[in-house]
Image (cartoon, rainbow, N blue to C red):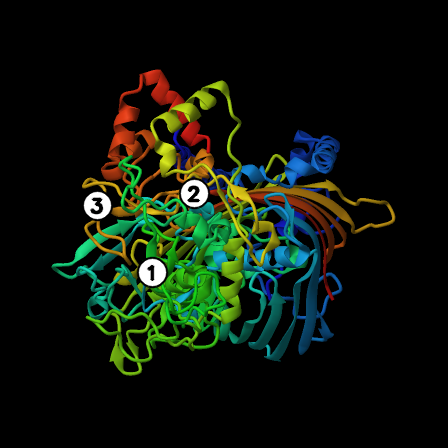
Amino acid sequence: MSPRVAREVSIVASAALAVCAIAASGLVLVATPARGATSGSVAKPPAVADPETPYRGHGDAFSYGGHGELRFGHDRQAGVSNPDWFSVGQAGGFVEARLHPRWKLALKGAYDRGQDDFTLERALVEFKTGGPLRIHAGVIPAPLGTTNLSHDAPACEFADRSLVATDLVGVPYSELGIGIAGRAAKGAFAYEVDLVTGFDDGIVMGGAGGTRIPSGRNNYGDQNGVPALAGRVVWSPGGGSELGIAAQSGRYNRTEIAGVTVDQARNAHLFVADAASSLAGFRLFGETSLALVDVPPGLEGLYAERQWGASVEAGRTLFDPVFGGWKKSRLTASVRADAVDLDARAVGDSKARVSASLNLRHTTHAVLRAGWYYEVRHDRFDNRIPFAGLTLTAASYF
Amino acid sequence: MTHLPWLQRLHRATKSPSGSGAPPSSAPDRAAIPAGAVSLIAICVTCAILIGCESMLTTKPDPADRFDEPVVGLDNGELGDFQDGHEQFRKAFSIREGLGPVFNNVSCASCHSGDGRGLAENILTRFSRGADLVPGEGGPQLQTKAIPGATAEQVPAGVDVSYRLPPPVFGVGFLEAITESTILSNEDPGDSDGDGISGRANWVTPAGYVPADEPGGGTAPRVGRFGRKASVSSLLQQTVEAYHQDIGMTTPQRPQDNVNPLAPAPEGLDEAPDPEVAGNHVADVIQYMRMLAPPVAGEMTDRRLQGEGLFATARCNRCHIPTMRTGAHEIEALANHQIPLYSDLLIHDLGDELADNRPDGSADGREWRTAPLWGLRVARDFLGGDLLLLHDGRAHSVDEAIRAHGGEAAASRDAFLGLTTEERGALLDFVESR
């Protein structure tokens, strides 16, 4: 079998795996009786500071909190150890102020190792109507999949996010905009529709080596004056099951620079589908994404016009509680397989990874995590470059 | 605020919805696969990972099979320089960092697979009109990519065109360390010995920015040794021109952007300040390439020994000289070594079939530098199983490459063709094991 054929087989197999996982989750969803609204993707924080949540605060009016993660890793590339054995995975804080029973201000910012920068993830004002509809405006987390909406380290199962999250969606990804969110059918369906600034030309201008969606994140402004449309629809029949479809579409480039026309309008589209459910005691989660980018003609052939990825993970609680003295402790194990193809037309330029993780949670909001991953990257020549590592992370809300 | 990932939902799902202490809703699931068994599996897997750490955490490939390994004998400082250069060699530039306005690729490593040759898609197009490099028409190299707002170049009408596959970069430090007198000692420009082979050096004038204390530098003509026609004498020049022509990045040596002169890009399109690549990074890359070791040749079997004999009998070794000796070099590990490059670094007339009819330095359109044969043993590993030999990669095997030889190499080619199938196989096995 030639390398090209083998790779295509592996891509098809990965796609089939992702589709099967999502389909399986969907079947479980269908088989699961609805119990009402339990979705976490659009869940609201508690109104009152609750010791069982990350929030601390003073009554209804104000709540706040923070989170952090320390990562100790023994990472290797093709047998050579990476000297960076310690890093801060995340460090951030969040506040919420209820100005009125219907009005809320929310602010969240965090340093994130995945982005290697401090990001304003949330700075919004939200108005809740009398019904299930909410209106929000400001810096909004892009509703592009569960991972982007819920990615705090203490709440995650793995030390590193999936390749879909890091290389396609660019978690954490927030943007300026205004939109609505709400629920329907007794909470079984949730939706969010936003008009946002969208990606900027960093998709092609800022990406080192080619098209890179995360390089087009622009939290603070609109480069071309044309808003993008982002939205997500979630079906949550209950039992922790959820099926979400999300997309963002809009112009990403500038047609004029310093008054000179340099290009025609070009669009980028990002689609994300995710599903979560449980089967035979295992919790399943899958997320897949497809990016379509209208690349300027001078970059065709070198910059990708189509990228995609998929991630499938399964987890199970092993001990609950772990020790008699730790009533709230839990030990969970999870495995994940994920892959991204950063140029669907190129032979290489892809990554695939498997990860395993053991999570000891002393309380719900603090975790000590031991993990292992093995990642294979293929450069544009399709040369294979293996990466692997053992990680020990400690993460907590505070 | 949302802090409810799927695991927390799992936790909820495995508890009573009301949290009243009722039996977990997923109790039947847990019974399906006992937690104890799962725990045992998880612990076993963890132990297997820890016990098998070496393979589970990747293993180092055999350095002899790589193009990106350092030469033996470097001191700690040099190894540090090697690592710095390695990083710069692999660095892919973004448009915001200065890529373009016209260019061919985004990094050094994007054209040199594993630091070896490039693929057909990496082929570079050189053009000129006779000895005129036609800079006013985009010469001497075509840039096929352009950033938004700029226009990629087209080959102008009526020019001489030559296609060049990116050559390997390993071992160039050893080539640099060979003295000019050693190279010239193999010259026979007038074919005084009457063997039909008349190699000569390509005397070239270094670019003005190459100082006299740089190997191959100065104002006087020097022996060219790098490139398909040995038209460059200095690694500094080779590197700076690659940044400028191939990647569209300015350097302290060439601080002006390379533009398409026939379709100038609007002012301000390239917002990165010049030079876009710092001088120390250029130096890092040069030092890195200097210290790249050639792969180790394969084991000499009886068949290969036979092939080596036939290689000499066919007089292939008159140009593909098996070894040359390096002279002094500032990197001690490169100095005074007998290196198995299988080349004389001279230019030879290789006949009509390979001629590009485009002069380069003092080399005419039929002359090419004898290509070093080292590294052929593992070249396929980095080219998707192909070999892509000769200046434009037209030959997919050593056999095809030999058959394309003409001119001064015609007698050797004919001698090869006169061998039996078994003998040709032995010769090819020997060459492909270098």
Q: Which mark is residue A19?
A: none
Discs 1, 2: same chain: no
Taking the image as shown, residue A380 lies to the left or right of residue A163, namely left
Q: Residues within 10 Å of mark 3 (few under 14, many from 20)?
A: some
Q: Can residue A130 be seen here? A: no
Which chain letter matches label 1? Answer: B
Which chain letter matches label 3? Answer: B
- Which element is circle 3 on? loop
Q: Is residue B318 above or below residue A84?
A: above
Q: Residue at x 29, y 47 (%)?
A: B189
Q: Which mark is residue B355?
A: 3
Q: Can residue B51 be seen here? A: yes
**Residue B382 percent coordinates (x, y):** 44, 40
Which chain letter matches label 2? Answer: A
Q: Tell me which corner region of the image, top left, top right, bottom left or bottom right, holds residue A122.
A: bottom right
Q: Observer-nearest residue: A80 or A219? A: A80
Q: Residue at x 43, y 74 (%)?
A: B275
Taking the image as shown, residue A49 lies to the left or right of residue A295, namely right
The residue indicated by pointer 1 is B204
The residue indicated by pointer 2 is A382
Q: Residue at x 52, y 51 (%)?
A: A163
